[in-house]
Image (cartoon, rainbow, N blue to C red):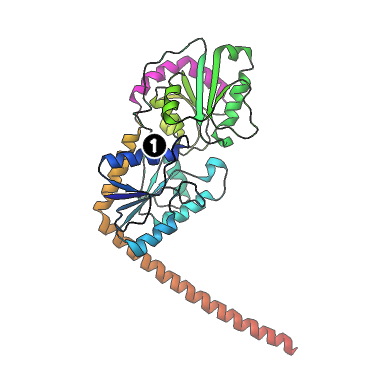
Amino acid sequence: MKVSIGSKIVEGPYGGGNLFVKNLKNYLKKNNIDVIDHLDDNDIDIILLINPLKYAETSTYNHHDINYYVTFINPDALVVQRINECDERKNTTTINEQIIKSNKVADFTIYVSSWLQGLYIVKGLDKSNSAVIMSGSDESIFKSSKKKIDNSKFKLVTHHWSSNWNKGFNIYEKIDKLLKNEEWKERLDFTYIGNIPKDFIFKNSKVIKPLDDVKIAKLLKTFNGYITASLNEPSGNHHIEAAQCGLPILYINSGGIPEYCENFGVEFNENNFEEKLKEFIEDYKKYEKNLVNYPYNATKMSKEYLDIFNNLIEKRKEITTKRKKEKKVNVILYLIKSRVEKIVFNLYSKISIKLSNLIKSK
């Protein structure tokens, strides 16, 4: 099997999407799968579309390139699209539309959470040829181990590559303000790891610049608990990494995050945050025990991708035959539409000329 993943890998701290590509590529190679990141070969079995968005920094091709490939180079190639993005996440306005348009080339769609799948189904994407595969991080790096922690204060941490405000900075700012209060100052310590919004300053919290995955994993294990306040997050890697390191999660009820954190921490919303923070500190040991059975990791995730790839290849003839029929129908509809538009245009032109002549004669 030859799989093309439409994204290059960036070394060092970058983001969850980059780690997904890295983990999947490593797993496929270990299973003797030929993995490339381009469409130059004419014998690709599976094309995995990662990011069809215009000007995406890591993308190596988009849906237009895929459409050309399966039309003129290799009609037997099967196309899978992984969707892990939406406008709701960063208050943008064009991402959903671009993803929906790009999905027309996909034979199968994979979402990173049921929440995200539901969002796009409501917008018109087909549910029948889709599945949810939960994200996971590299368990050889992010793994629980005994740690010695100074328990004089509860040590709370979060980490994000993105500095977008929706990553939860309204809540992180609230924590920072709580730490001015004498009660909380004696009880809680908060650390933020990663990039922060321009002109935003933490006054009572510790800030650490972005770290690579090995350093992040080592540092996370020095904390008691983790918080994520990221809004409309399709899945996210940050809380998964923390959970794999054995940290209970204080998580916001938003996006796909509750699907990953339920039973492994305390859920909160913007109105009950301080109350839930107190509950989390008191009960975190209970959730710490549950994390021994945390189910989401890179190996499980990657195996599910490979299972889908194998299943699609078994149905290749059925899928490609259906695709060819759909393309013929689309061509016929296009020709009909073009013919109707031409007739309407000619009719409009004749009417315009007659009206113009009528006006001139008067």
Q: Residue at position x 55%, y 20% from top?
A: 190
Residue 278 drawn above or below residue 117: above
**Mark 1 = which residue?**
135
Asked whether 176 or 250 is in front, the reply is 176
Residue that appears at 56% across and 81% down:
346
- Secondary structure beneath dot 1 equals loop
Neighbours of disc 1 within 10 Å: few (<14), some (14-19), many (20+):
many
As drawn, the residue found furthest toward the front would be: 11
Main SS of the magenta part reads helix
Q: Position of residue 323 (x, y in %)?
A: 34, 61
Image check: 263 left or right of 322?
A: right
Q: Is residue 248 visible?
A: no
Q: What x and y, as percent, mark residue 218?
A: 42, 23
From the image, which quarter does the C terminus lie in?
Answer: bottom right
* Residue drawn at 49 percent across, 16 percent down: 281
The correct choice, above or below, for 243 with respect to 38 in the image is above
Q: Is residue 306 magenta?
A: no
**Part of the protein shown in magenta:** 271-294
Q: Is residue 84 above or below residue 258?
A: below
Residue reaching furthest to the top: 152
Q: Residue lying farthest bottom? A: 361
Q: Which amino acid does the dot numbered 1 rest on?
A: Ser
Res. 77 visible in picture: yes
Task: Tell which of 35 and 66 is nearer to you.
Answer: 35
**Relative image position of residue 238 (x, y in whole percent):** 46, 31
Occupied quadrant, residue 104:
bottom left
Q: Is residue 56 left or right of residue 134?
A: right
Coordinates of residue 66 in the picture (x, y in percent): 39, 57
